[in-house]
Image (cartoon, rainbow, N blue to C red):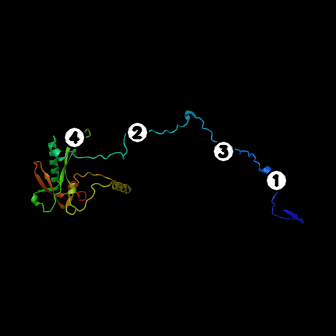
């Protein structure tokens, strides 16, 4: 800035000229004082000893402690499926074991009772082998045995059931459609939700010999060995346990 005839004019700042002696003095290293440290930069003090009143620190349990806590049960991934084989359990003998066991009389009485029940519901009629049409495959069957026990493990009764081996049936000849013998859990839950939403009453029944009430739409022939060891031929009129269409009919 300079003044000309009383008027002020702006001019460019001239570059200051520094003498050599001052330049040498300024180029010398100067000690720079350390920055002041505020309280915010100070580290946190160590925690005070609060004594037994302080909250205890969490301790990780060892594998042995977890085992004692939850028991010695293995994970579901480590569990192997239990394979059940008929004949290895005395409560589920095979047909040969039942006929030759010390309880052969009890098993024979159970088979007779099952045949009487089948006749009561008119499930079959006895026929001659010559009455079976040519080309019709006889569906294989078997006897399933079970010893039902009470809560104190004493024998309640000997139970025998005549069941069909559905895998020996031929689609289109012995059956057309097949359904699951039991509903899915999700289906049952949906029914309960609908009943609760509509405020319906829920009741449960146990139908005795439910499968033996279904009329068959196909001609099915099976065989049976009576108590005298003779082979009998049956023509089924109603569904039998184990057939493909038993749950559908």
Q: Nearer the viewer, residue 11 or 144?
A: 11
Q: Would you identify the image quadrant in which residue 216 lies?
A: bottom left
Marks 2/1: CA–CA distance: 86 Å
Q: Residue 1 in the image: x percent, y percent?
A: 84, 62
Q: Are marks 4 and 1 in contact (CB under 8 Å)?
A: no
Residue 237 appears left or right of 40: left
* Tag 2 residue: 67
**SS at badge 3:** helix
Q: Quadrant of the C terminus?
A: bottom left
* Tag 3 residue: 41
- Mark 4 vs mark 1: which is more N-terminal? 1
- Mark 2 vs mark 3: which is more N-terminal? 3
The residue mark sitting in front, 2 or 3, is 3
- The residue at the point 18 percent across, 51 percent down is 142
Marks 4/1: CA–CA distance: 122 Å
**SS at badge 2:** helix
* Tag 4 residue: 155
Q: Residue 159 in the image: x percent, y percent?
A: 20, 46
Marks 4/3: CA–CA distance: 84 Å
**SS at badge 4:** strand
* Tag 1 residue: 20
**SS at badge 1:** helix
Q: Tell me how many marks there are.
A: 4
Q: Residue 33 in the image: x percent, y percent?
A: 73, 45
- Mark 1 vs mark 3: which is more N-terminal? 1
* Relative vertical location of residue 62 with respect to residue 171 in this rendering, above or below: above
Q: Nearer the viewer, residue 89 or 109?
A: 89
The residue mark sitting in front, 4 or 3, is 3
- Mark 2 vs mark 1: which is more N-terminal? 1
């Amino acid at each position: 800035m300079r003044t000309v005839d009383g008027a002020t004019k702006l001019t460019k700042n001239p570059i200051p000229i520094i003498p050599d002696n001052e330049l040498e003095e300024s180029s010398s290293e100067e000690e720079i004082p350390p920055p002041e440290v505020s309280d915010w930069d100070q580290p946190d003090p160590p925690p005070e000893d609060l004594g037994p009143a302080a909250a205890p620190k969490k301790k990780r349990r060892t594998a042995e402690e977890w085992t004692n806590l939850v028991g010695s049960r293995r994970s579901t991934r480590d569990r192997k499926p239990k394979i059940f084989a008929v004949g290895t359990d005395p409560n589920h003998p095979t047909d040969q074991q039942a006929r030759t066991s010390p309880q052969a009389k009890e098993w024979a009485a159970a088979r007779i009772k099952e045949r009487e029940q089948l006749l009561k519901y008119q499930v079959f009629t006895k026929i001659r082998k010559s009455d079976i049409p040519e080309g019709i495959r006889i569906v294989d069957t078997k006897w399933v045995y079970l010893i039902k026990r009470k809560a104190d493990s004493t024998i309640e009764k000997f139970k025998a059931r005549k069941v069909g081996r559905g895998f020996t049936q031929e689609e289109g000849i012995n059956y057309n459609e097949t359904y699951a013998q039991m509903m899915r859990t999700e289906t049952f839950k949906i029914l309960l939700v609908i009943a609760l939403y509509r405020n319906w009453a829920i009741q449960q029944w146990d139908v005795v010999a439910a499968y033996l009430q279904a009329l068959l739409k196909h001609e099915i022939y099976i065989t049976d060995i009576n108590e005298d060891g003779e082979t009998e031929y049956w023509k089924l009129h109603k569904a039998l346990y184990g057939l493909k269409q038993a749950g559908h009919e």
